[in-house]
Image (cartoon, rainbow, N blue to C red):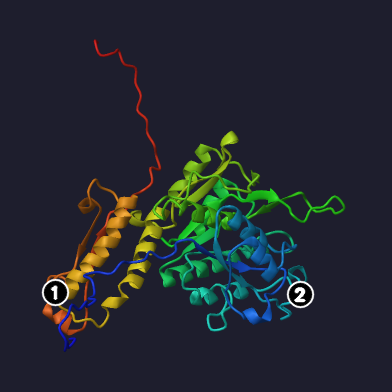
Amino acid sequence: MAVYQAPGVYIEEVEGGSRPIQGVATAVAAFVGFTEKSPPEDVGTGPTLVTNWSQYERMFGGFVEGAVLPHAVYGYFANGGGRAYIVKVPHLDGADGDETRNALPVAADDLIGNEAERRGIAGLAVAEDVTMVAVPDLLTIARGADDAVDMTTWNGVQTALIGHCESQKDRMAILDSPPGMSPPQVQAWRTEAGLDSAFAALYYPYIKITNPLARPNNELPKMLTIPPSGHLAGLWARTDGVGVWKAPANEVLRGALDLEYKMTSGEQEILNPIGINAIRAFGVRGIRVWGARTLSSDPLWRYLNVRRLFNYIEDSLIGGTQWVVFEANDANLWARARRTVNSFLLGLWRAGAMVGATPEAGFYVKCDEETNPRESVDEGRLVIEIGVAPVKPAEFVIIRIAQWAGPGA
C-alpha cells in the first residue's frame, strides 16, 4: 500500500477484473521433404520459417527434379498460405549442399526424424505455433524404381505423422492418399491401413499442375501429377480468414489444372463416410475441395473445422490464462478467471463459431466453489469448466419440393 505524506490528489493504477485472451494463429503450416539446397549456415538446423515463395527460394532454392516439396510450398502460398516451416530431409551421403536429385533415395526414418536433432516430423516439436503438417515427399520415398508404392513405408510414415499431431494436441496432419488409385482401391487401402484420428484429414485424388521445369528444349512433361496436401494447407489458411470454424471446403483449389482421377457423386458416396475428402472438378466452377471430415470414427470429431476450432480455443486459453498461475486461489480469482474466459468465448460466439441465438446456447463457463472444492484448492488446483457448442457444416443440403395447387385449393 502506498504511503502519502503531503495533501493532494493521487492516482493509483489497479489491475482490472479480467485480462483479454489473444487468439493464437490458426494457419501455420510445416512441410517435411526435399529441397534443392540447404539454408545458409547461419540459419542453423531444424524447422526454418519462411513467409513467402521468394524467401523460400532464397533459403532453399527453387523447383528441382525429384522433389515434391517445392511444388507443395508454392501451392501453399498461391492458395493463401502466409507462414510455413520447412524441414529439409537430410541426404543419405550427408552432403546437404548437393541437389536433391543426386541424393535419392533416402530412408523413411529420415522423414520421421529425431526430436533431439530437430530432424524430420519429430523435429517439429520445437515449432510450437505450427497448426498443420504435410509430408509431400512421402511419394518420392515410398515409390520404388518400378513406380510401385511400398505401402509399409507409406502407412508407417503417415502413422508417425498422425502420432506427432496427436501428441502435440494442437496441429492437424494433412494426408495424401497413395497415387494412382481408383475410388474402390483407395477405399480398400483406407480400410486396411486402419487410420483413425481426429487430428488428421485425408484427401483424394492427386492434382495436375504446370511443370515449371518444362522448357521447349527439354523433354520434361508440361504437367505434373502431385499430392494435393500443400495446396490444401494454403486453402485451409485462406478459409481461416473467415474463421477457423469455417469448413475448408467448397473452395477452388488454385493452381490445380486437372485431376488424376475425376470421380462422380456415386463414387464419392463410398469415400465420404470413411473420411476421405474428395477433390472434384465442377466444370466452369473449377476444381474444388468437396469434403471436410477428419479420419475419426467418433461422430463428435467427424468434422475438420470442429477439431480445429477446439485446437484454437485450447491453445488460446493456455496462453491467455497464464496470469492465473500462483495467484491467491479464492472466489475473487475464480470470478476474474471466469470473466476472462467468458469474454473470449463471447467474441467467438459473436463471430459465428458457435450455435445458438444467445450466448447461453453456444457456451458456458463455470469456475466457482463447485468446481473448486476445498480439497482441490488445498492441492493447488484451480478448475475452470467450459462447454462449447460448435457450428457444424451443412454437409447435406436437402431441398424438399412438391407441386402445389395454390392458396385457394
Residue visible at 28% across and 69% down in the picture:
19
Q: Earlier in the sequence, mark 1 or mark 2?
A: 2
Is residue 178 something that shows in the picture?
no
Q: Residue furthest top?
A: 408
Is residue 168 rendered to the left or right of residue 263? left
Mark 2 Cα-neighbour bin, 10 Å: few <14, some 14–19, many ≥20? some
| Residue that carries the numbered disc 2 in the rendered image | 98
Three-letter amino acid code of the residue under disc 1: Ala
Residue visible at 54% across and 60% down in the picture:
82
Question: What is the C-alpha distance between the residues marked 1 and 2?
Answer: 63 Å
- The foreground one among 289 and 49 is 49
Q: Nearer the viewer, mark 1 or mark 2?
A: 1
Residue visible at 35% across and 49% down in the picture:
392
Q: What secondary structure is marked by label 1? A: helix
Is residue 350 something that shows in the picture?
yes
Residue visible at 30% across and 72% down in the picture:
321
Quarter occupied by residue 94: bottom right
Numbered marks: total? 2
Q: How far across and down, in percent of the image, does residue 183 sit?
A: 56, 46
Three-letter amino acid code of the residue under disc 2: Asp
- The foreground one among 176 and 156 is 176
